[in-house]
Amino acid sequence: MTFVSLKELMPEAKKNRYAVGQFNINTFQWVEATLRIAEKEKSPVILASTDRIVDYLGGFKLIAATIKKMVEEMGITVPVVLHLDHGLSVERCKEAVDAGYSSVMYDGSKLSLDENIANTKEVVAYANKQHVSVEAEIGSVGGTEDGITSGIKYAAPNECYRLVEETGVDLLAAALGSVHGVYQGEPKLAFDLMQEISANLNEVPLALHGGSGIPAHQIVKAIEYGHAKINVNTECNQAWVKAVREYVEQHPDSHNIPEIMQTGMHAIEKVVTEKMHLFGSSNKA
Ligand code: 13P
């Protein structure tokens, strides 16, 4: 089985008002837990490595080859997307495409709009030749991810339209008040802007970054207003740490690594199950 791209999954998700979860990977245990639940839930799934975690996990080629093997060995039949999250340069996106990723995000959000468009266009031209999907970002998602901290900068509608029209990306991460990591208080998503932008993008869906910690009713509304991909990282990590910490506290003399790791893995599985139910992607594969 090969990975599918978001070109295959997004139009149907946007049309039928559900979102496919992007679950970030921190070790291959995250992959195993997420794949197992995707198969159980009959849900399409997006596995993503942030650019910064790629080297830590052994590089693009190792990640793509390992996950491909895991998909085969685990007998996974649901569609699996392997996605580069926050690609930091055009070259890194090309490397991911060459290694077998089926989707890449080019994050030019810190650049001027013209530079963002020019670079994203180059990524799209390269990726399209391999049927690899491309996500672009505009505005600034707040919070901290992989050690990088940013303030929230809301995406401007006219910039969103230009970026999508001039580059031909498959989906857009328009920063609309979400935050990577932990929210301070209730998230303040700009639903008015979201509705306006999504309506004008027609079939092109929005991607919601910082999906951890957003209350269920806001997630449901974000899907209603055009989000077809929702990214989750922090909640899986928090669940893993909590479960492993509790296990170690309760078994201070244990060095049974498989048991300790399984405890963490089950905690991830629980989060992934809940998200698939909330996003409406269960039974959509
Ligand atoms: P969280 O860590 O807040 O869930 O965000 C994940 C994300 O948006 C990855 O790009």
Image: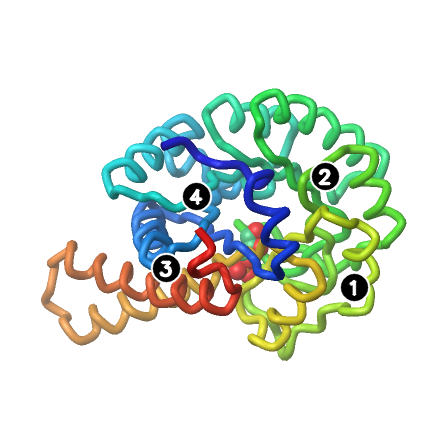
Q: Are marks 3 and 2 in contact (CB under 8 Å)?
A: no
Marks 1/3: CA distance?
Answer: 29 Å
Which residue carries the number 4 mark? 79
Earlier in the chain: of badge 4 and badge 2, it is 4
Left or right, residue 162 beside residue 7 = right
Is 231 placed above or below 135 here?
Answer: below
Task: Return the mark for residue 41.
Answer: 3
Q: Amino acid at mark 2?
A: Gly
Q: Nearer the viewer, residue 139 or 1?
A: 1
- Mark 4 or mark 2, whichever is nearer to me: 4
Q: Earlier in the sequence, mark 4 or mark 1?
A: 4
Q: In the rendering, which numbered label is found on residue 195?
A: 1
Q: Which tag is nearer the camera, tag 3 or tag 2?
A: 3
From the image, state whether disc 4 or disc 1 is nearer to you: 4
Task: Tell which residue pokes out farthest to the right in this image.
Answer: 158
Amino acid of disc 3: Glu
Pointer 4: residues within 10 angstroms few (<14), some, or many (20+)?
A: many
The answer to the question of whether label 4 and label 2 lie on touching residues, with beta carbons closer than 8 A, is no
Q: CA distance from mark 3 to mark 2?
A: 34 Å
Tag 3: Cα neighbours inside 10 Å, few (<14), some, or many (≥20)? some
